[in-house]
Image (tube, grey):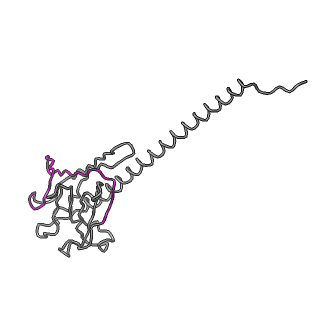
């Protein structure tokens, strides 16, 4: 009785089937890895937008304006250089300014000099009447666009100055666009200001 080995054709078939299985498995693993990376990047974008929205909403709901206090100016839209900005006095202080009382908060989206945009934030006590002399804090990168609209009565306005409009708006609409894995992720939020703060 002689031992029978594999023929050349059987070996080629086995190698071909193995190669097909390995190629298919590699394709599946690569696809899953790419999907995981894309979801992770999009998840970071969603998290960033949520954090910024929540912070701005808390500060806007605590907005304070007094016609007799020049430091309580509520202003937003585009600044002289065309950069989106928002400035307001608010009761939502953070440890950056001592953590209590009314503070002035300023946001500005600007170019970081390397082709990327960065959201800057500054905060200082209202009673100081002077802007902070320290550098603005880098709050977030990866933001492609920031836009504010302001509503009082039935009209939306792209810019607001409390000294010209006579106080605070009723609503602030925030459009935030962050970078995702496959493109830009837009977020739209409308924030209602607390009406009891208007007459302070």
Q: Is residue 18 magenta?
A: no
Q: Is residue 186 left or right of residue 161?
A: right
Quarter where residue 80 is shown: bottom left
Q: Is residue 146 left or right of residue 2?
A: left
Could you tell me which residue is drawn at 88 percent across and 25 percent down?
A: 2
Residue 113: give x, y in percent of width and height. 27, 59
In the rendered view of the protein, which quadrant contains the C terminus?
bottom left
Question: 180 or 70: nearer the eye?
Answer: 180
Quarter where residue 11 is shown: top right
Residue 46 in the image: above or below residue 137: above
Q: Which residue of the protein is positioned furthest toward the front in this rendering?
A: 8
Quarter where residue 21 is shown: top right
In the rendered view of the protein, which quadrant contains the N terminus?
top right
Residue 111 in the image: above or below residue 132: above
Could you tell me which residue is drawn at 24 percent across and 61 percent down?
A: 107
Q: Is residue 140 magenta?
A: yes
Magenta stretch, residue numbers: 137-164
Q: Is residue 153 left or right of residue 139?
A: left
* Number of marks: 0
Q: Which residue of the protein is positioned furthest toward the left in this rendering?
A: 164
Residue 106 in the image: above or below residue 128: above
Could you tell me which residue is drawn at 21 percent across and 59 percent down?
A: 86
Which SS does the magenta portion mostly show? Answer: strand
Residue 166: give x, y in percent of width and height. 10, 59
Residue 85: give x, y in percent of width and height. 21, 58
Residue 55: give x, y in percent of width and height. 31, 59
Q: Which residue of the protein is positioned furthest toward the right in this rendering?
A: 1
Question: 37 or 102: nearer the eye?
Answer: 37
Question: 165 or 41: nearer the eye?
Answer: 41
């Amino acid at each position: 009785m002689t031992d029978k080995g594999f023929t050349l054709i059987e070996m080629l078939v086995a190698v071909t089937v193995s190669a097909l299985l390995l190629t298919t498995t590699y394709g599946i693993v690569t696809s899953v890895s790419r999907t995981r990376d894309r979801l992770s990047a999009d998840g970071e974008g969603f998290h960033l937008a949520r954090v910024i929205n929540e912070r701005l909403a808390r500060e806007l709901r605590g907005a304070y304006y007094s016609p007799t206090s020049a430091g309580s100016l509520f202003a937003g839209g585009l600044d002289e250089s065309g950069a989106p900005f928002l400035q307001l006095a608010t009761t939502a202080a953070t440890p950056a300014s001592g953590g209590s009382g009314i503070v002035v908060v300023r946001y500005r989206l600007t170019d970081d000099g390397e082709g990327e945009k960065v959201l800057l934030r500054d905060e200082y006590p209202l009673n100081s009447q002077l802007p902070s002399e320290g550098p603005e804090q880098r709050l977030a990168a990866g933001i492609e666009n920031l836009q504010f609209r302001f509503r009082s009565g039935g009209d939306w306005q792209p810019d607001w100055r409390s000294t010209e409009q006579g106080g605070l708006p009723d609503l602030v609409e925030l459009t935030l666009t962050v970078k995702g894995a496959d493109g830009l992720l837009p977020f739209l939020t409308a924030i209602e200001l607390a009406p009891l703060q208007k007459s302070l």
